[in-house]
Amino acid sequence: MNAEFIEALNQLEKEKGISKEVLIEAIEAALISAYKRNFHSAQNVRVDIDRDTGRVRVFARKTVVEEVLDPRLEISADAAAEINPSYELGDIVEIEVTPADFGRIAAQTAKQVVTQRIREAERNIIYEQFVDREEDIVTGVVQRSDNRQYYIDLGRVEALLPFQETMPGERFKHNDRVKAYITRVEKSTKGPQVFVSRTHPGLLKRLFELEVPEIFEGIVEIRSVAREAGHRSKIAVSSREEQVDPVGACVGHRGMRVQTVVNELRGEKIDIVRWSEDPVEFVSNALSPSKVVSVDIREDEKVARVVVPDHQLSLAIGKEGQNARLAAKLTNWKIDIKSESEADQTEEEETEIPDGEIVAEERVETEAPDGEIDAEERAETEPRDESEAADAAEPSDRAKEKDGI
């Protein structure tokens, strides 16, 4: 190695951001292993690289002792004194043992170390770049797939899109362009691994940020998102400026903004509702497109009991309960939906009877007061008098008596 090598390290430090000192220390450590391997030496050695000229020297390190047991690691006090009279017992003496052809080995080793460190540095740079982009949206090109996932080329790194993170029925071909949401970034022996998703609710949020300038500028805010990927989603939005309609801003002129998002999500239906601090209003909005008659909030149970018109009950619940389920996720309230007729019936059943009144069924079952016998019991225990017997006679008997028969 020579001065040109040191200049190359200086250039790497500027371009790649890799410290020259760190590289030289790594090369010195690698040269120690190379020396022992190539020259079958068990000595304790140190490698020194001149920071200006690039000259490489190898020094054997020996401990000063009274009696030498291992000449590879120890040196006698007398021998050490010949080198420098100031050495004492226990001191470390360094003796240069640089081989004549060590320059070739040093150059090869240095090349390997520098290449490895450059690769590691680039991996770290890529990792730092993408770890800061977690929960962000990226666009890549499908390169290949296996039986578990797609491999998406993002430029400097390859992202992994597992099949379970794709929408139902969604399939990609080679060179297809894909927008995806970064869920996490991990370090591995092969470099940083970026995992992306097409089903995450964050993808919907980021797509609206790209399409709606008011969201990007912070005028309109997405408060919550509920999504069943590939089928239907709901987002709740609010505005920081009264003159800006948050729902209209997200829908766009003739629905162009929301339609762009729908197209990217392969036709997924999207409901945009107005967010409200009032849970009654928010729950009512979340059940859109169904109309709501009333909302009863029970804070202690975190339950919202909703009444809707009879003809809109199925619309409020949605196919397989989807609309109600998404509304519950969006509002973070348990939602119990009933039609008006069901609600009226429940109110009648729950109505309390006024004090002092007894309904017919209860009157039949009520015990008679002491000393009194009710009608049925009297019929069974007391004989009827003649007048009562005559009244009780059948119509045919009365007719006979009247005719004198």
Image (cartoon, rainbow, N blue to C red):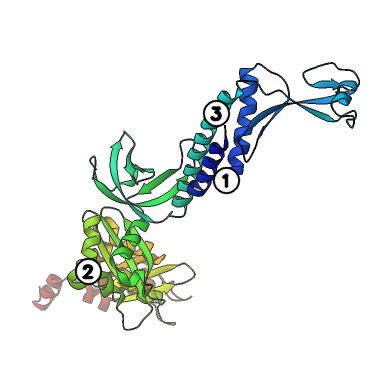
Nearest to viewer (mark 1 / mark 2):
1
Cα separation between marks 1 and 3: 19 Å
Residue 346 appears anywhere in the view: no
Looking at the picture, tell me which residue is in the foreground, 180 or 155. Answer: 155
Which residue type does callout 2 highlight? Gln
Give the labeled residue for mark 2: 312
Q: Which comes sooner in the sequence, label 1 or label 2?
A: 1
Above or below 231: residue 146? above
Front residue of this view, candidates 38 and 135 = 38
Read off the residue under disc 3. Answer: 107
Looking at the picture, tell me which residue is in the foreground, 352 or 11. 11
Q: Secondary structure at mark 3?
A: helix
Classify 140 as above or below 225: above
1 or 3: mark nearer the eye: 3
The residue that appears at 11% across and 75% down in the rendered structure is 399
Left or right for 402, reference 144: left
Label 1 to label 2, Cα distance in Å?
69 Å
Image location of residue 16, percent across then percent down: 49, 46
Quick one: label 3 or label 2, which is nearer the N terminus? Answer: 3
Q: Could you tell me which residue is drawn at 38 percent across and 45 percent down?
A: 156
**The N terminus, quarter of image:** top right
Q: Which secondary structure lies at badge 2?
A: helix
Q: Which residue is mark 1?
A: 19
Residue visible at 40% across and 77% down?
278
- How many other residues sit within 10 Å of disc 1, few (<14), some (14-19) or many (≥20)? few
- Residue at position x 39%, y 51% from top? 182
Residue 379 lies in what quarter of the image?
Answer: bottom left
Q: Earlier in the sequence, mark 1 or mark 3?
A: 1
For mark 2, does the 10 Å Cα neighbourhood hold few (<14), some (14 to 19), or many (20 or more) residues?
A: some
